[in-house]
Amino acid sequence: MKLLHKDIEKDNAGQVTLIPEEAEDMWHTYNLLQVGDSLRASTFRKVQTESSTGSVGSSRVRTTLTLCVETIDFDSQACQLRVKGTNIQENQYVKMGAYHTIELELNRKFTLAKKLWDSVVLDRIEQACDPAQKADVAAVVMQEGLANIVLVTPAMTLLRAKVEVTIPRKRKGSCAQHDKALERFYEAVMQGILRHINFDVVKCVLVASPGFVKDQFIGYLLREAVRQDCKVLLENRPKFMLVHSSSGHKYSLKEILSDPTVTSRLSDTKAAGEVKALEDFYKMLQHEPDRAFYGLAHVEKANEAMAIDILLISDELFRHQDVATRSRYVQLVDSVKDNGGTVRIFSSLHVSGEQLNQLSGVAAILRFPIADMSEPEDDSSSDDD
């Protein structure tokens, strides 16, 4: 994401102009947008024209519109973002108050205006515009006949390809059908890697499976790379890392990222940091439950005691439509930071973020135990999801 212009007043009202440069920037934009914001961007509009002879025709013209945002729709797999709202700046093609849907495009600027730019949104812009934040981890989670090729970016986990091939069982005295099917499967996975993994960006490719499937696949991959003289695979051979997983399904990714050998290699990635923070929380919940709280009301009470060391919170909570509820989460984040605590905002499109959402989307590891914690009278955390 490229920041072209930023104009925010002392009362935190103002606007920013941004250019999304890659698909993941649409996810960041989705988290920046709120109902009631003003979005200005170029779009296509179908207009009717009447000639001097009275005949009516229609054509699509590109025009720049400013919408008051009413509906935000994000497609996580295609990374497409559509924003629907009413026009608040009339031009020759669109009247005031007319509805229109803008699909934001890569490498085309947009301007977003808000009445209040809070700290969470401003941090999101900094994160999105940081050139060091890149999709630097890929994973192939597999078992016999099933493989999921996944990209782990700082903001989300993207399933890029799913390979399924029926593998016949080995029969006594004949393994030919089994071996042929397995070779077809490995070939399909290899083609998926070449098609979906950009080795110029990716620093590490995790290949995970139960048993010896991963070892057999890597053996096949390297043999084929030599036979086909595939320089991309041969030059990036050191980037492949073999890891054990309990299955070939996508949910095994959390288990893979929790592996100590993987954690040490990926220590500088946001996804690995989130997984480790969640693991630390569960360990604390098991061994020192007085230092691990979850649910908004309990976490707020711990914050009142200035006891929070690490706050774990899902970005899904900041997309709440109710302004007062959203403000409550923002105030919690600001307060924890002011008290010297660390805040980790989890992406709801990471496996760790999905798991945190099961804990009402907010949890905390405390500096010191709070043993005498009475049940809060108004625990509205279940309603705030």
Image (tube, helix red, strand yellow):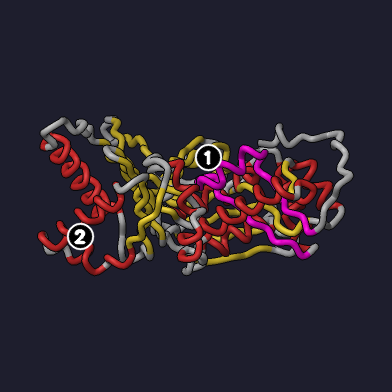
Of callouts 2 and 1, which one flags the residue occurring earlier in the amino acid sequence? 1
Does residue 210 appear left or right of residue 361 in this picture? left
Q: Which residues are magenta?
A: 340-367
Mark 2 to mark 1: distance in Å?
45 Å
Where residue 136 appears, as percent x and y from the top left, is: 41, 62
Element assignment for label 1: strand
Q: Which mark is residue 127?
A: none
Q: Which mark is residue 222?
A: 2
Disc 1 target residue: 72
Question: Which residue appears at 23% of the width and 35% of the height?
Answer: 165
The amino acid marked with disc number 2 is Leu
- Give residue 78's quadrant in the image: top left
Where residue 213 appears, as percent x and y from the top left, is: 29, 47
Where residue 96 appears, as percent x and y from the top left, is: 54, 40
- Give residue 246's quadrant in the image: top left
Question: Which residue appears at 52% of the width and 47% of the height?
Answer: 30
Mark 1 closeness class: few <14, some 14–19, many ≥20 residues within 10 Å: some
Does residue 243 appear left or right of residue 254 in this picture? left
Q: Quadrant of the C terminus?
A: top right
Is residue 250 visible to the viewer in this orientation of the structure?
yes
Element assignment for label 2: helix
The amino acid marked with disc number 1 is Ile
Q: Nearer the viewer, mark 2 or mark 1?
A: 2
Vertical comparison of 55 with 187: above or below: above
